[in-house]
Image (cartoon, helix red, strand yellow):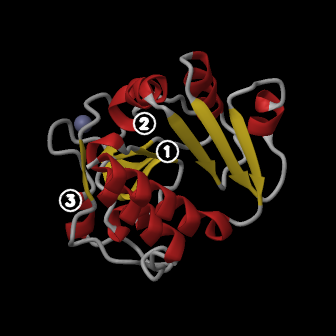
Amino acid sequence: MLENAEPNESHRIIAQIENELKDRFQLITQNVDNLHRRAGNKRLFEIHGNYREIKCSASCREIRPIPTELKGKELTEDLTQEEINVLKCPNCGAWMRANILWFDEYYDERTYKIDSSLKVAKNTGVLFVIRTSGATNLPIQIAQTTIQYGGYVVDINLENNSFSDYLSTKKNKLILRGKSIEFSPKIKQLIKNCVEQCV
Ligand SMILES: [Zn+2]
């Protein structure tokens, strides 16, 4: 299913915004579907991982792309010997696993960029929170950090969520309710205008 998914208009607009802002833009995403990369985003922190990557399930934690030898399978199909070979860690021989944050696992820096994303949050002037409910702790921590260091948070979601609970008593916030695609073209245009005026 993920292989057949394609980046949509919202993905493309976010990639265009990065293209305008270059190093003044960073994207922190909970998506593991690789679509932001495919849309062209490069300054990217995938805090829940990326399904196109695997890592060692033991301690050496090497992260690498899914081997090309590995093909989609039905649940009842067995792995071939070649597939088993590419799914063993070349360093320690343990099984490789998806580089995705699973339930009951903790955020760390090497895989999930906890320190880097909080550093981005600290240094950001405007944090756009788009289409996420804040069901895990790091996204909420990111919004709290931006506010604590004097930045603004724009919460764009269909409904109230953990972010709006936190932001309700804060001054530096803007709450927008609707689909991201209703706002993102306008945001892109505003950013483009700003960038042109600054040149
Ligand atoms: Zn290993």
* Residue at numbered disc 3: 85
* Extreme-left residue of the structure: 90
**In screen coordinates, is 193 left or right of 1?**
left
Q: Earlier in the sequence, mark 2 or mark 1?
A: 1
Label drawn at residue 112: 2
Q: Residues within 10 Å of mark 3 (few under 14, many from 20)?
A: few
Across and down, in percent, residue 121 comes to 48, 29
Q: Amino acid at mark 2?
A: Tyr
Q: Does 18 appear above or below 63? A: below
**In screen coordinates, is 170 left or right of 11?**
right
Q: Does 117 appear above or below 49? A: above
Whole-angstrom CA distance, mark 2 to mark 1, is: 6 Å
Q: Is disc 3 in contact with disc 2, using a CB cutoff of under 8 Å?
A: no
* Residue at numbered disc 1: 48
- Residue at point 45%, 79% (across, down): 6
Q: Amino acid at mark 3?
A: Asn
Across and down, in percent, residue 129 comes to 62, 46
Q: Earlier in the sequence, mark 3 or mark 2?
A: 3
Whole-angstrom CA distance, mark 3 to mark 1, is: 26 Å
Q: Earlier in the sequence, mark 3 or mark 1?
A: 1
Across and down, in percent, residue 146 comes to 56, 26
Q: Does 183 appear above or below 163? A: below
- Residue at point 55%, 33% (across, down): 105
Q: Nearer the viewer, mark 3 or mark 1?
A: 1
